[in-house]
Image (cartoon, rainbow, N blue to C red):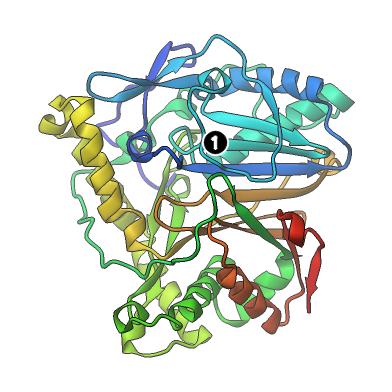
Amino acid sequence: MTHSRAKNSAAQPQARDEWMPLDNAAHIYPAARSRNWTALFRVSMELTEPIEPAALERALSRTLRRFPAYGMRLRYGLFWHYFERIAQPPAIQKDVQNPCVRMDLRENNGYMFRVRCHENRIAVEIFHALSDGTGGMCFLKTLVAEYLRLKYGAQIPFTDEILNCDEEARPEELEDSFLRYARSVPMSRGESRAYPLRGTHEREHVTHVITGLLSADAVKERAKEFGATVSELLTALLILAIRRVQQKEHSRKRRVMPVKICVPVNMRKFYGSRTMRNFASYVNPGIEPVYGEYTLEETISAVRHYMGLMATEKQLNAKFTTNVLSVRNNFLRATPLFLKNPTLRLMFRLTGDRQTSGLFSNLGNSPLPPAMQTYVKRTDFLVGPLRYNPVTCACVSNNGLMCINFCRVIREAEVERNFFTSLVRLGLHVRVESNRAQNNITMILR
């Protein structure tokens, strides 16, 4: 751990507490959700054999004891939302064609996540108020490992990401690491507005998912040739994919707006945090078309240098410290929730999705112990559509297979087409899949 514990740490919730405050990043999500939108992400694994729902139900019951923060419902307090423990067990749901549609927090006994299965696949869809992608992947790995132990007697070792369900949750797994590590110097939230993608919105609860499957090693080697990381290369390609859409705009003002991508950054790597709750910040690298057109090399350079400058512990700490200090503001703390929610919604509208043209979230390589990998064919990560951005992109790799998932709520597929075509032009072999019935034939791009 590279930084010592901050002096202003908050009391850590205990595993058996009947209620729990939201972590600092979670406050915005209940306020920002709408009748048609909830901030959701999804992690899933495809196994080698069909899922037995009864065994999965038993595995979920054991996993929930190890992840007590997941056994909570959202409640409205006088000043803040809070989590309250649920006595009834959650149900296993059948998976659906349209993932990450709005979650009604009254369904499924009030749980803020869904466990779904279909044929060989186990999927977990999680409300972002509960956790981030890293925490969600740990929950999925623990759940699948527990299922394989119960179903097959698999001898799967415990790791930092596969937790022992016979143990109690450790206090550090439940902590709000934002409060623990925040300092005293904030950063302005002000940023230029980015180019907003537009399109023909689909009817409610229709989501297009386009998945690209390719060799993780091949992508890594290609990125190395550009002097970039995999995330830097893929972020640059996404920026240029959106730029090609922007070039077709009739309005000159929209044609030269910045194209920026929100890239979440896992803060655990800076502090050694073990929390299973939210602990991620973000950076918004991009290009400025008003200055001219950018080549791929120039875009990669812009992304690499921006990440080098902004994705540092000090910069990111100042960014989340801004939110921590806001929550600690005496006036805001004393404001009733019914007045606080409109303010939080306005902040989200002005400083959230409006500052970016899309999102790219990369969980990187997600290894499994050999005894578990034997049963797992692939791992997927999907971020549901944002409130104001209709296209998101998420990536995870396992056992040499990289899965890049686009999630879209508009009919036009230009961004994905541009993105995957660029990968093919770099000499990479991409297999593309879709969740739509009219596109259910696997396509090979060569």
In the foreground, 251 or 279: 251
Residue 114 rendering spot, x and y as whole percentages: 61, 31
Q: Is residue 248 above or below residue 318?
A: below
Judged from this view, the residue extending furthest toward the bottom is 292
**Nearest the camera: 264 or 162?**
264
345 to the left or right of 406:
left
| Residue 355: quarter of image | bottom left
Relative to 179, is 201 on the left or the right?
Answer: right
Residue denoted by label 1: 126
Work out whether residue 301 or residue 330 is closer to the camera in this orientation and state it: 330
Q: Is residue 258 left or right of residue 189?
A: right
Q: Is residue 370 visible?
A: yes
Q: Is residue 321 visible?
A: no
Q: Where is 390 relative to 333, above or below?
A: below
Q: Residues within 10 Å of mark 1 (few under 14, many from 20)?
A: many
Instruction: Name which residue lies at 46% across and 20% down.
Output: 73
Q: Quadrant of the C terminus?
A: bottom right
- Decide: is 237 above or below 190: below
